[in-house]
Image: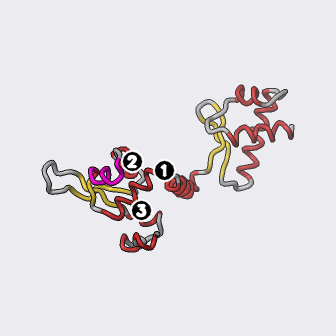
């Protein structure tokens, strides 16, 4: 039973979706349905009694290992930090142009980069690193972009004036 319990725990730990008992049985060789069910229940009791930050929940016709609601804020901060760390080279270039030249039109960003930048600007807006700060007074009134407070926080800046000067970067 101990081996079955460890295998069930491993399956639930790595799964990113609810696992039904039949599916767990497929993955845990030579385990009877009652052994799998008992292992899940024993793990649930252990996690609950141990005051763990996670537990096994029965959802969508299966079981899934989930963090407890009390830790939702911590998980949200972690996900945000991971997302912010994973900026592509193109996103970093675009972000740097916006940061140093704000307020700036998309056309000006594209002129500097030499490629279309609309999708990247949209992605940076979704990550709350760039925002629309107004409209230019030229014909067509194009949107002007600038950085956000989240941008400052991600890069550890108090204000935009704290950006390194171009000559300091070299």
**Residue at which label 1 appears:** 88
Quadrant containing the N terminus is top right
Label 2 neighbour load within 10 Å: few <14, some 14-19, many 20+: some
**Residue at which label 3 appears:** 151
Q: Secondary structure at mark 1?
A: loop
Q: Secondary structure at mark 3?
A: helix
The reply to whether dot 3 and dot 2 touch (C-beta < 8 Å) is no
Q: Can you tell which quarter of the image residue 44 is in? A: top right
Q: Observer-nearest residue: 129 or 58?
A: 129
CA separation in Å, label 3 and label 2:
15 Å
Between disc 3 and disc 2, whose residue precedes? Answer: 2
The reply to whether dot 1 and dot 2 touch (C-beta < 8 Å) is yes
CA separation in Å, label 1 and label 3:
15 Å
Q: Is residue 148 above or below residue 61?
A: below
Residue drawn at 76 percent across, 48 percent down: 46
Residue drawn at 14 percent across, 57 percent down: 137
Question: Which label was assigned to residue 47?
Answer: none
Residue 108 falls within the magenta-colored stretch: yes
Label 1 neighbour load within 10 Å: few <14, some 14-19, many 20+: few
**Residue at which label 2 appears:** 120
Q: Observer-nearest residue: 148 or 49?
A: 148
Residue 3: give x, y in percent of width and height: 85, 38
Q: Observer-nearest residue: 129 or 165?
A: 165
Q: Tell me which segment is drawn in magenta.
A: 107-114
Furthest residue to the left? 139
Q: Can you tell which quarter of the image residue 104 is in? A: bottom left
Of labels 3 and 2, the one closer to you: 2
Between disc 1 and disc 2, whose residue precedes? Answer: 1
């Amino acid at each position: 039973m101990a081996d079955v319990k460890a295998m069930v725990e491993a399956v639930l730990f790595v799964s990113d979706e609810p696992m039904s008992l039949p599916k767990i049985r497929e993955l845990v060789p030579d385990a009877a349905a009652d052994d799998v069910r008992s292992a899940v229940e024993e793990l649930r009791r252990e996690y609950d009694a141990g005051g763990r930050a996670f537990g096994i929940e029965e959802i969508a016709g299966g079981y899934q290992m989930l963090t407890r609601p009390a830790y939702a804020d911590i998980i949200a901060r972690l996900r945000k930090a991971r997302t912010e760390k994973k900026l592509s080279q193109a996103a970093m270039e675009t972000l740097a142009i916006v940061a140093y030249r704000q307020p700036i039109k998309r056309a000006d960003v594209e002129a500097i980069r030499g490629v279309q930048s609309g999708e990247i600007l949209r992605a940076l807006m979704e990550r709350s690193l760039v925002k629309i700060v107004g409209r230019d007074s030229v014909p067509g009134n194009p949107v002007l972009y600038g950085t956000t407070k989240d941008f400052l926080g991600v890069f550890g800046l108090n204000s935009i004036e704290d950006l390194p000067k171009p000559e300091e970067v070299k």
